[in-house]
Image (spheres, helix red, strand yellow):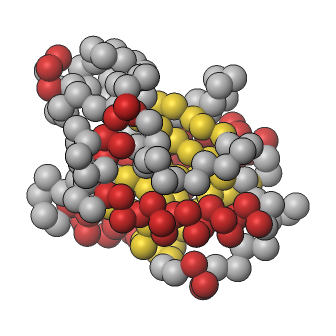
Amino acid sequence: MENRKALVIVDVQNDFCPGGALAVRDGDRVVPVLNKYIEKFAQAGMPIFFTRDWHPPRTTHFSTDGGSWPPHCVQGSKGAEFHPELQLGSDTVVLSKGMAVDKDSYSGFDAVDSCGLSLGDVLRQSGIKRIYVGGLATDYCVKQTVLDGLKRGFQVVLLQDGIGGVNLQAEDSDRAIEIMVKAGVTVGVGIDKFHIE
Ligand code: VGL
Ligand code: ZN
């Protein structure tokens, strides 16, 4: 148990997928890819954490209250649900973030579980040293989660085939990856290259 690893899946919710309020182009492409990682981690007995964007109906995160984004992932809405094909499994840990009415919150490390424990707390309690991060969106929540993980001293692997970006500017995702690499992330692609046991 010295070298425990965890999979962290960021915000694979309907509103970030095609047809959603803040859709990432081909966002649902990540679902089958991440399902393979989920299967692999589950088989190895390694924990899997799912974060979700979980906003109140009114928040300064939304353009309707002066913020940057169209309303999305409102608590209890269809858009806030995980993509229906994402394999959540049975002993799933879901962590929620973005509940403040007056703050943006992009990092999975701001997310808390049903007991109020943060992602960092849960990872440390489980003896996790390395996290594998995939999900949506590359240029916001995935990027912040990766940077915060590195800042907190975790080894972080970015699952490059399991991420997708908003790309308000076409190059935003590429730039985000550059920033993550400079900060020390390892970029990994392809389920077969991973030996997590
Ligand atoms: C996100 C923009 C606004 C994300 C969340 O999950 O990347 N992006 N809220
Ligand atoms: Zn949001």
Q: How many marks?
A: 0
User: Which residue, as the protein is rendered here, is positioned at the far bottom?
Assistant: 193
Residue at horizontal 14 percent and vertical 26 percent from the top? 63
Q: Residue sitting at 43 percent across and 22 percent down?
A: 76
Percent of width and height locating residue 154: 62, 57
> In the rendered view, would you say 151 is above or below 53?
below
The residue at the point 79 percent across, 73 percent down is 197
Measuring from the top left, give residue 174's x and y in whole percent: 25, 69
Q: Position of residue 168 (x, y in %)?
A: 14, 52
Left or right, 171 with reference to 32: left
In-front residue for pair 171/77: 77
Q: Quadrant of the N terminus?
A: bottom right
Q: Residue furthest front?
A: 84
Nearest the viewer among 66 and 193 is 193
Seen in the picture, residue 27 relative to 81 is either above or below; the reply is below
Q: Nearer the viewer, residue 149 or 43?
A: 43
Q: In the shown orientation, is residue 28 left or right of residue 51?
A: left
Q: Which quadrant of the figure has residue 42?
A: bottom right
**What residue do we see at 39% from left, 68% from top?**
182
- State whether residue 103 appears in this view: yes
Counting from the top left corner in percent of width and height, residue 96 is at 51, 31
Asked whether the viewer can see residue 147, the reply is no
- 194 lies above or below 173: below
- Left or right, residue 58 beside residue 50: left
